[in-house]
Amino acid sequence: MRIIQGAAVGLVMFAAVAALAEHEATEAGAQAAVAGGGTAVDSEGRLHVPDDYRRTYQLLGSWAIAADDGRGSKEIHVVYASPGTIDAFQKDQRFPDGAVLVKEVFKTATGELTTGTVSHADALKGWFVMVKDATNRYPGNALWGDGWGWSWFNAADPSKTTTINYKAECRTCHVPARASDWVYLDGYPSLKR
């Protein structure tokens, strides 16, 4: 009986160590995005559209923005999360430090199909990039605050942000989502447990 109890304790300890190692690996992967030389931000705090995000990131979800008049949508937003972000959020219900969210914003084309009025992504307008910053890495940088780095990039020039001050240009749209860490969670079923 003592051998069985010892084996059970050993298995529980092994499972706990494995779970901790998996959590730390997820956190380390997310934090790598904000480490110097990361693809989403450089050592000066300048954000970038990450290379190959469509291939290496996870699809977080999408949004259709209704047309001002008429039928269909005027924009479609497709959002990706850096590797490990979804798993970490499902476990802790928070975005891990270093998590990167990339939102593609498309103009749409709307037409009639056999299924009804359909809007689909047409021309890319640009990207909105957010990087979780739980440690306030870039104090005084007008693109960082409220726990995130924030930047918009026009499709014509993905290498340079047009954002000058996140408080005036980004945060105002996110105020209704303040209680959920400035992110609208409803459109992301993959974050639900």
Image (spheres, helix red, strand yellow):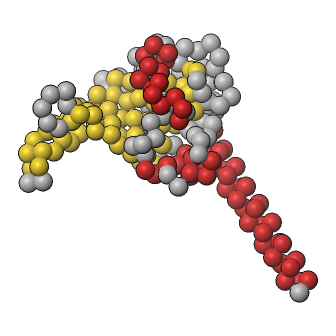
State which quadrant residue 140 falls in.
top right
Taking 62 as reference, is 13 left or right? right
The image shows residue 127 at horizontal and vertical percentages of: 38, 30
Q: Residue at x 8, y 45 (%)?
A: 112
Rendered-image quadrant of the N terminus: bottom right
Q: As rendered, which of 112 and 21 lies closer to the eye?
A: 112
Residue 4's place in the image compared with 144, above or below, is below
Residue 145's place in the image compared with 89, above or below, is above
Residue 53's place in the image compared with 46, above or below, is below
Note whether residue 45 is visible.
Answer: no
Taking 105 as reference, is 190 left or right? right
Q: Looking at this view, name the residue that lies furthest to the right.
A: 2
Q: Looking at this view, name the residue that lies furthest to the bottom.
A: 1
State which quadrant residue 120 falls in.
top left
Note whether residue 155 is visible.
Answer: yes
Q: Residue at x 45, y 28 (%)?
A: 176
The image shows residue 34 at horizontal and vertical percentages of: 60, 32
The image shows residue 66 at horizontal and vertical percentages of: 23, 34
Q: How many marks?
A: 0
Q: Residue at x 62, y 24 (%)?
A: 43
Q: Residue at x 58, y 23 (%)?
A: 146
The image shows residue 159 at horizontal and vertical percentages of: 42, 24
Taking 150 as reference, is 187 left or right? left
Residue 144's place in the image compared with 1, above or below, is above
